[in-house]
Image (cartoon, rainbow, N blue to C red):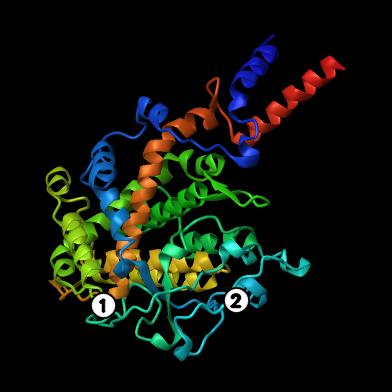
Amino acid sequence: MAVVFFAIVIFLFLPLYSNSYASSVSIDSVSDAAQLSCKYTGMVEDCSCDYETVNSLNKEVLHPLLQELVTTPFFRYFKVKLWCDCPFWPDDGMCRLRDCSVCECPENEFPETFRKPSSVLRKEDLMCQEGKPEAVVDRTLDNKVFRGWPEVDNPWTNDDETDNSEMTYVNLQLNPERYTGYTGPSARRIWDAIYSENCPRYASGEMCPEKKVLYKLISGLHASISIHIAADYLLDEATNKWGQNLEIMHDRVLRYPERVRNLYFTFLFVLRAVTKASDYLEQAEYDTGNPEDDLKTQSLLKQLLYNSKLRSACPLPFDEAKLWQGQSGPELKQQIQKQFRNISALMDCVGCEKCRLWGKLQVLGLGTALKILFSVDGGNHLPLQLQRNEVIALVNLLHRLSESVKLVHEKGPYVEKIVGQVSGIPLKASTLQRLWQSVNDFRTKKSS
């Protein structure tokens, strides 16, 4: 009888999934999610804002402004070194495969579009998941001139930002962060190295606050990247159908409360860095050669930096003054700084071009936030100097995190309701598929 009842429950719920996780579920309305109680309430751990305030501010103020700001010419172009020279392990051959490599063009040809990915993969290239066209960077650019910014290296990151000979501009609007097919050992090795070698999980009570912050930042960034992959996923390669893959969103992030909490923490950490640098960012030069666009960029940035709702509801998203206390502070800072530089260097080991682009951008953005909040030497604050690329990375990272927080808040409760719970029993969507198949097989036998 219990089996029959459970089969009925599956029968009632699984129409939601029929064809859904072969092609995934796409939710067009968030009304159902809004009616469900919020799972995350109270203060965000180690921060000075609560989840309800963060969600409200993000929806009403931050996300709309950032969404518009990152489309302006100044924040649209990112200078990046797209090469494949991994300093941590031998070349695994990924960069020799056709669509995984980067065409190095003479300086006088830049910024021409110099490579079109082939739509046909050879049999020997199929092992390279990142060789798919969606993993290749589109280098179509406008002729933009940026000037008036210092070129200084960031002590928290690995790339030499002053070495312009090996860097190229990329239009981020033509290369959105989304699914690329980058899976398997090559992709797993990157995250394993980040967590195991540079940001180990310490036993309870063994992690000092500073190392805890680093771990939470990496975890929050990882969660955000996973959310964006799931939110813009290739559902059907044959028809080039893109949409939301709620199974991945649930399995990689939503079913782990710690990852969601770390996403909110990282968002508030980066937001604090942006607001702390407000005077510098307000006075900086946003010259792209188009006065109208540049005035719009400055206006949007001021609205973000000096928003009255943000200042009254969440004036201090994260309090960095609590860290680096005691005599071991300077030594600990150098140790964690070295760890983060290693994480930055690992981005050169990413075998997928587009993943490498967004990995480098977001790690540079996080390194810029660390630079802003912890730019101290012997207790004395150093004059803040940011290069143009750091500001572009910082604002784009804040937008990525804002988008992820918005998706988690709007979609999370509904996804968890339909994917993670059936009759009170936590189940993965893949499990539901198998159960649904079993019910179908049973019905087929009965009718034959």
Please, what secondary structure does the residue beneath circle 2 have? loop
Q: Residue at x 61, y 17 (%)?
A: 9
Q: Residue at x 26, y 69 (%)?
A: 371
Q: Could you tell me how far apart the alpha carbons at marks 2 and 1 are, in whole angstroms? A: 32 Å
Task: Name the kind of residue labelled 1 in the image.
Answer: Gly
330 horizontally vs 246: left or right: left
Task: Name the kind of residue labelled 2 in the image.
Answer: Ser
State which tag comes first along the sequence, 2 or 1: 2
Badge 2 is on which residue? 101
338 horizontally vs 323: left or right: right
Expressed as whole percent of the image width and height from the top left, the position of residue 297 reads 23, 64
Specify the farthest residue to the right: 448
168 horizontally vs 437: left or right: left
Is residue 309 visible to us here?
yes
Expressed as whole percent of the image width and height from the top left, the position of residue 3 reads 69, 15
Badge 1 is on which residue? 289
Q: Residue at x 55, y 20 (%)?
A: 423
* Dot 1 crowding, Cα within 10 Å, few <14, some 14–19, many 20+: some
Please, what secondary structure does the residue beneath circle 1 have? loop
Q: Residue at x 66, y 74 (%)?
A: 98
Image quadrant where one finds the C terminus: top right
* Dot 2 crowding, Cα within 10 Å, few <14, some 14–19, many 20+: some
Specify the farthest residue to the top: 1
Image quadrant where one finds the N terminus: top right
Expressed as whole percent of the image width and height from the top left, the position of residue 304 reads 20, 55
